[in-house]
Every structure is written in C-alpha cells, then in structure tokens.
Image (cartoon, helix red, strand yellow):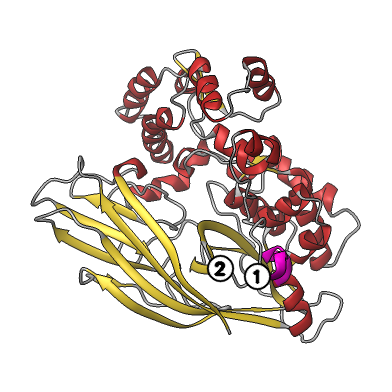
C-alpha cells in the first residue's frame, strides 16, 4: 500500500484524546498521542492508517492559518483602509472567515480577504480590485456580452461550440529547496481523452520526459525523474480541440442504457452518511426520474452553498457532508457534494477536473457528470451555477445543469486516482491534479516549496 492510500481510512476518525488536542490546536501534543497509538499493538491497522494521515494533516494545517486577529485585520486594511475590526468580527460570526485554534488562540485563514473580494463585489471595489467571480463570469466576450452567456447563447443557437486551445504549464523547485545532485521527480497534468476533447497534441516538453501517461489515464501526467545539476523548470506545451455539444433537456434525442457503476461510496469523502441520506430523501421525495432527482440536487447545491476559497484539500475531512452542513465550499467541494448526493439517490455521477482555459484566463477547476436516460451522460458545474446565483443570472444557472462551455481542459476523470507512475511520498493534493506535483528522494513537496505556472497561449474558436 502506497502512503497516499492511507487517505482511504481518513473517515474512521480520531480517538478522543487526540481529537481534543487537535481541536485546541495543540498539534505537538496530538502528534505525541498519535505516536503512542501507532506504537501500541492494540491499535487496529485501519485506525493506524487514519492516524498516519491525521499526523501529516496537523503538521500542515498551521501554514493555512498563520494570522492572529490583529494580523488578519491589518491584512484586510492593507487592501481596504476603511476595513474595521468590528466588521472583521461580524464576518467571523457570520461564518464568512475561516479559522482554527492554535494553542487555544484563534488563527485565521490566510486567503480570507481574497475570498471576500472574489465573491463580493463590494469588497473588491473597496480594495480597488477588479471583481471576478469564481467562475470567471465577469470576463467579457464580443460586444461586451459576458463570455459565459455568449457561449451558452451560441450553443443554443448552433448546437455546438469548438476551439483549439494551446497551453503551457511548468514547475520549478524554489531555490531554497534545490540541492545540487539530488533526485527530483516532477509531474504536470496533460489533457486526457474524453468525450469533449480530441486531437490532443504534445507540442513541446523540456527537458526530455521520463514518461507520458496514455490518453485514457484517470489522472494524466507528464513525468520527469532527474538528478538535477542545476535548478531549472520542467515545462510542457500542449494543444487540443475542445468541443461543447448542447443538450436540450426538453428534447430527448437518443436512448441509452443506465450504467450500473459510478453509484458507489468512495471513502473518505463520498459517503452516504445518515445526514446525507436524510437530505437526499427530503430533496427527492416523490421523484422517480433520475434527471429530476439530479436537478433537485443541483438546485440545492447552487442555491445554498456559498463559494469560498478553502485550505489545501490535504487538510479537509468529510468533504461532502461538511459542505452540506456548513453550506460553504469551492468548486471541487460543490462537485463532490453533488456527486455524493446523486449517487446516494441512485443517479450515477462521476468527477472531471483540470482547468478553466479561455482567452486571458487559466485557473484550476472541478465539475461533474451525471447519467440520466434517455440523454446519457450530462455535465453539471455546481460552482458556476452558484456563481450565477450571486449575479442573479438564472438562465446561466440553468445552463450549467446538463451543459458545459468549451473553456475547459480535462486532465482528470476520476477523483482520488493514482498516477500511472505513483508518487513515493505524500502528494500535495492526494485527490486531484491540476497544478502538478514534485517530490525528492525522501519526501513529497508541499505547494509552498515549488513554483507553478499555467497559461493559455492561444485560443482559436473553430
């Protein structure tokens, strides 16, 4: 079993002595207690796996929550001078600023103000920043028409929309991490074969790669292994054709058999807990058709979950259930909740992720697919739907149930899948791969130890 396989047991939970220390933020004390449990012959192997993951999680948590109250307020005021302490406290009370205890003292999420600006135009205006929705929806297309609305309109009018997209991605060790002659392993995402992507071309790779995954890999990568005599970037340029096909959900055009897979639980985050079973029962009461069940679930997610930046996924627990309980999350968290509720309702659902790739913008993004006869596999992008709710754009919200734009690069078609050349150590993201991974001979690297870049070099509508 590889070290990242331990995540499959994360949902088992912590012994109470460790849990108390973790919630208080005494991570050194929790680590000591974990080592005692790991060394005990009475600790079951499954619990040992959970403890092994939790130990590493707690070592990483403080990096996401470095700010005490005064520092957090000062950070906000550096961008918006009129920001007040009273305002900060109100936002915390309203659940709009994430925090944890560290040694009993509240410490605040390092990206809290960026998250406010991303999702609230008033904060962006006060900070003098251009407010851009989490889905990039403020980007204008031709004649000032929002790009996503233009894409939806063209798809409805023409039935399809295609583009050839040329991209570049790179990784580089930070200079303070680099050591001459040390073995380095690097991974970057590549576009994979899926229904919406074709004519995938690897245009340029520097340096010569050690391995390139086949196009049907669940998480496709280009992989390098090198003893580095000097620090340099690992980079890849690729192009592909992305085609969005419009599905009119009022006009079934073909028939398809229902698959008997993508219905299962997948620990630790896709679990049919008592709460989620109850929620599904409430949402789908009296509904038999899979399409309408999925629609009710999409409506719940898009109309109730508030978009927010979150800490690294490495540090998240019970993702789907906590999203349904806390009513907050980013694109991947919303997609996982949608998938989990669909599967719990008997509607097959699966993961897709990679990039939002459009002219002038490239960002990591996650979405989902669900199966409903007679249409077959359909797309759903809950975070784009939630973004449409924020903007009061009901037509756009409805569009992203059943359809997707062509501004995408899919690299991953399965959540929590391994690379075909597995990492030997902890992944920075153990569930998905959008920006790449790096490891040394003795350890996996965290995101703050290597630089990552991605960009759209050319976008040509076809």
Measured as percent of width and height from the top left, residue 308 is found at 62, 41
Mark 1 residue element: loop
Q: Quarter of the image holding residue 253?
A: bottom right
How much space separates mark 1 and mark 2, taking CA atoms? 7 Å
Q: Is residue 32 left or right of residue 442?
A: right
Are the residues flagged by discs 1 and 2 in contact, CB closer than 8 Å? Answer: yes
Q: Is residue 27 left or right of residue 242?
A: left
Q: Residue at x 51, y 20 (%)?
A: 74
Quarter of the picture containing the C terminus is: bottom right
Res. 195 visible in picture: no
Q: Residue at x 49, y 13 (%)?
A: 105
Q: Quarter of the image holding residue 275?
A: top right
Measured as percent of width and height from the top left, residue 156 is found at 78, 78
Question: Which of these two is toward me, 84 or 227?
Answer: 84
Q: Is residue 50 magenta?
A: no
Q: Residue at x 42, y 17 (%)?
A: 26
Measured as percent of width and height from the top left, residue 95 is found at 67, 28
Of all residues shown, which one is farthest toward the top?
104
Q: Which residue is mark 1?
A: 405
Q: Which residue is mark 2?
A: 408
Question: Which of these two is toward me, 29 or 461?
Answer: 461
Image vertical order of residue 204 relative to residue 391, above or below: below
Q: Is residue 25 left or right of residue 92?
A: left
Circle 1 Cα neighbour tier, 10 Å, few/some/many (<14 / 14–19 / ≥20):
many
Q: Which residues are magenta?
A: 142-150
Res. 237 visible in picture: yes
């Amino acid at each position: 079993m590889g070290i990242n396989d331990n995540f499959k047991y994360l949902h088992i939970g912590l012994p109470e002595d460790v849990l108390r220390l973790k919630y208080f933020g005494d991570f050194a004390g929790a680590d000591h207690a974990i080592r005692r449990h790991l060394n005990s012959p009475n600790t079951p192997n499954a619990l040992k796996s959970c403890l092994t993951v939790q130990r590493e999680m707690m070592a990483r948590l403080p990096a996401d929550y470095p700010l005490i109250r005064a520092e957090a307020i000062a950070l906000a005021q550096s961008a918006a001078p009129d920001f007040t302490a009273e305002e900060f406290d109100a936002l915390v009370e309203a659940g709009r600023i994430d925090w944890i205890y560290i040694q009993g003292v509240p410490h605040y999420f390092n990206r809290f103000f960026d998250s406010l600006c991303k999702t609230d135009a008033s904060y962006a205006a006060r900070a003098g920043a251009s407010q851009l929705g989490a889905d990039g929806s403020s980007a204008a297309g031709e004649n000032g028409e929002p790009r996503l609305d233009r894409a939806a309109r063209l798809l409805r009018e023409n039935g399809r929309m295609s583009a050839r997209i040329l991209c570049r991605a790179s990784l580089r060790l930070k200079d303070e991490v680099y050591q001459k002659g040390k073995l380095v392993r690097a991974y970057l995402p590549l576009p994979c074969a899926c229904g919406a992507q074709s004519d995938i071309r690897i245009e340029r790779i520097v340096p010569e790669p050690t391995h390139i995954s086949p196009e049907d890999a669940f998480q496709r990568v280009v992989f390098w292994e090198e003893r580095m005599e000097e620090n340099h970037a690992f980079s890849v340029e690729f192009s592909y054709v992305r085609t969005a096909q419009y599905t009119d959900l009022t006009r079934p055009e073909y028939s398809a058999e229902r698959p008997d897979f993508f219905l299962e639980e997948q620990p630790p985050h896709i679990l049919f807990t008592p709460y989620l079973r109850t929620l599904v029962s409430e949402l789908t009461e009296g509904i038999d058709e899979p399409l309408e069940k999925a629609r009710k679930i999409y409506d719940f997610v898009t109309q109730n979950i508030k978009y927010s930046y979150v800490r690294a996924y490495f540090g998240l627990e019970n993702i789907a259930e906590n999203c349904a309980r806390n009513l907050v999350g980013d694109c991947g968290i919303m997609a996982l909740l949608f998938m989990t509720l669909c599967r719990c309702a008997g509607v097959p659902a699966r993961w897709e992720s990679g990039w939002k790739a459009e002219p002038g913008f490239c960002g990591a993004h996650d979405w989902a697919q669900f199966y409903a006869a007679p249409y077959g596999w359909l797309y759903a992008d809950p975070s784009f739907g939630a973004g449409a709710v924020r903007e009061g754009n009901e037509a756009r919200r409805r569009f992203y149930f059943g359809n997707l734009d062509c501004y995408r690069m899919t690299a991953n078609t399965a959540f929590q899948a391994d690379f075909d050349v597995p990492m030997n150590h902890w992944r920075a993201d153990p569930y998905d791969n959008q920006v790449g991974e790096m490891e040394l001979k003795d350890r996996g690297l965290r995101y703050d130890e290597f630089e990552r870049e991605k960009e759209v070099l050319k976008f040509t509508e076809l």
